[in-house]
Amino acid sequence: MKLRLFGVFALSVLFRFSLHAQELKHLRVVFVTLAWNAQLPFRVADARGFLREQGLTVEQIFVRGAPTAVTALGSGNVEFSSIGGAQAAIRSKARGLDMNIIASISNYTNYTLIGSKDVRRVKDLRGKIVGITGAGAFSDFTTRLYLKRNNIDPDKDVTLRAIGQTVIRASALEKGLISAAPFSAEDTIKLLDKGFPMIANYNQWPGKAFRLCSTTTIAPASSTGSFTLDRVINERPLKQAQQ
């Protein structure tokens, strides 16, 4: 049976295990978001029966931010992680953790920067608090990059405060505890309907897709990637998917 490699976690990894998959009954996968773009590949694979075809049951575990997901993976408590952005994995690899990026949904970000009702331009953020998931999270990385590209020093001109997941950031914005925060598509729509302004679309730079790299000669970074360790791959070798 021919299977198309989507470049996403559920379809490129769980979907194509070798014969070892028949022996594997339970997998633990850590997610850092409930956003539809991160969850859809897994849910499609589950609904279409791809996991059951390989004799797999998958336990979803949700944690706060990529650093926590990386810690869970390194501890051996989970076999795979789905993380927004590759930077946490790259840092862990540089520090000696045998982490591998095995798939990616996209090399673009779908984040927007939503402001409080009195903050409508990026320059209005000077001296203000911008909420992120946590230090080292994808929201931290993309927001820092966007601010720098708009001549705002994220370490001096604004305060990047670790707030937590989307629901907590939205609540903080509505209560006036922060002046802006990054949100994915569905949360952006909800906040726009409530009258909060969109300061920026991270996917527009300027007038074109905002790739997560500084020049076109550098490969764009993963937006939402799937990660595992060398030992997991060695124990359960992956079978190359047919295009």
Image (cartoon, helix red, strand yellow):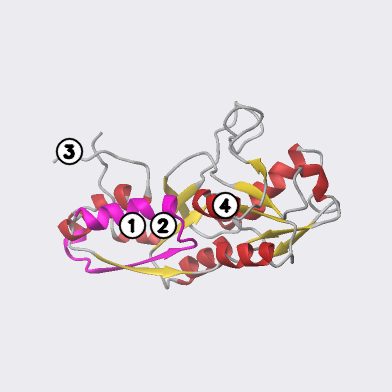
**Residue under the image location 49 percent in, 52 percent down:** 186
Query: Which residue is identified by label 1?
Result: 234
In this rendering, the answer to whether 152 lies above or below 36 is above
Sequence-earlier tag: 1 or 3: 3
The earlier-in-sequence mark between 4 and 3 is 3
Left or right placement of residue 222 versus residue 78 in this view: right
Tag 3–tag 2 contact (CB < 8 Å): no
The kind of residue on which mark 1 rests is: Asn
Marks 4 and 2 in Cβ contact (< 8 Å): no
Callout 3: helix, strand or loop? loop
Residue 232, image x, y percentages: 36, 61
Region rendered in magenta: 21-48
* Quadrant of residue 162 within the rendered picture: bottom right
Q: Amino acid at mark 2?
A: Asp
User: As rendered, which of 1 and 106 lies closer to the eye?
Assistant: 106
- The reply, left or right, for residue 94 in relation to residue 130 is left
Give the distance between the C-alpha atoms of the residues marked 1 and 2, in whole angstroms. Answer: 6 Å
Q: Secondary structure at mark 4?
A: helix
Of labels 3 and 2, the one closer to you: 3
Looking at the image, which is closer to me, 15 or 169? 169
- Report how far apart the C-alphas of labels 4 and 3 lie in the structure: 43 Å
Instruction: Please tell me which of labels 3 and 2 falls first in the chain.
Output: 3
Residue position for label 3: 2
Asked whether disc 1 touches disc 2, contact meaning CB atoms under 8 Å apart, the reply is: yes
Label at residue 193 = 4
Alpha carbon distance from label 3 to label 2? 27 Å
Residue sitting at x 46%, y 50%: 225
